[in-house]
Amino acid sequence: AVRSGYTWLAVVGVLNSVFSLSYYFKIIQQMYSVKTETANLTLDEKSRAPYNSLRGLREVNPTVKKSYFSPFLTTAVVIVLLVIIFIGLYPSPFANLAQEAITFLK
């Protein structure tokens, strides 16, 4: 956009990206923060909670806030992270694949 004389468009794009990052970071923080009402309940009260977000977590001290990620979520995040790093380090096979797809679609 800058090379074509649309510097204002590049500035708007950067500002939009910064604004959206702040929005998405708030969502991610809410997703992974340990803010549960059940954290300070006794074990008997936890079993009667409407949705026990600490299910499967065997706590010795229920007042200690712990973060629990399922093994499936952890595995999925690690796999996606490795794929992203691999694509970032070796983009040429994927760029070639995209170029072939463009040629095929023409």
Image (spheres, grey):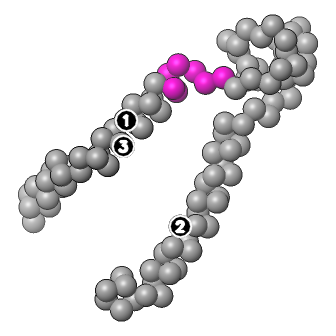
Q: Nearer the viewer, residue 85 or 35?
A: 85
| 77 relative to 95 in the view: left or right | right
Give above or below for 60 relative to 12. Answer: above
In the structure shown, which secondary structural element does the residue marked by tag 3 occupy? helix
Q: Quadrant of residue 39?
A: top right
The answer to whether one can see residue 90 in this image is: yes
Contact, CB < 8 Å: mark 3 with mark 1?
A: yes
Instruction: Quote the CA–CA distance across marks 3 and 2.
Output: 20 Å
| Location of residue 52 by image quarter | top right
Q: Earlier in the sequence, mark 3 or mark 2?
A: 2
The residue labelled by disc 3 is 84
Compared across the picture, whether 32 is left or right of 18 comes to right
Element under disc 2? helix
73 inside magenta stretch: yes
Q: Tell me the CA gap for discs 2 and 1.
A: 24 Å
Does the CB distance between marks 3 and 2 fall below 8 Å?
A: no
State left or right for residue 106 relative to residue 66. left
* x then y, percent, for residue 90: 23, 46
User: What's the distance in space between the residues labelled 3 and 1, CA to CA?
Assistant: 5 Å
Q: With respect to residue 71, does 100 lie above or below?
A: below
Does residue 104 show up magenta in the picture? no
| Residue 61 percent location from the top left of the image | 85, 11
Disc 1 marks a residue whose amino acid type is Leu
Q: Which mark is residue 82?
A: 1
Residue 42: name its quadrant. top right
Residue depicted at 64% across the width and 58% down the height = 23
Q: Which residues are magenta?
A: 68-74
Q: Position of residue 1 (x, y in %)?
A: 36, 82
Amino acid type assigned to the residue bearing label 3 in the image: Ile
Q: Tell me the element at label 1.
A: helix
* Quarter of the figure with the C terminus: bottom left
Q: Determine which residue is flagged by label 2.
A: 17
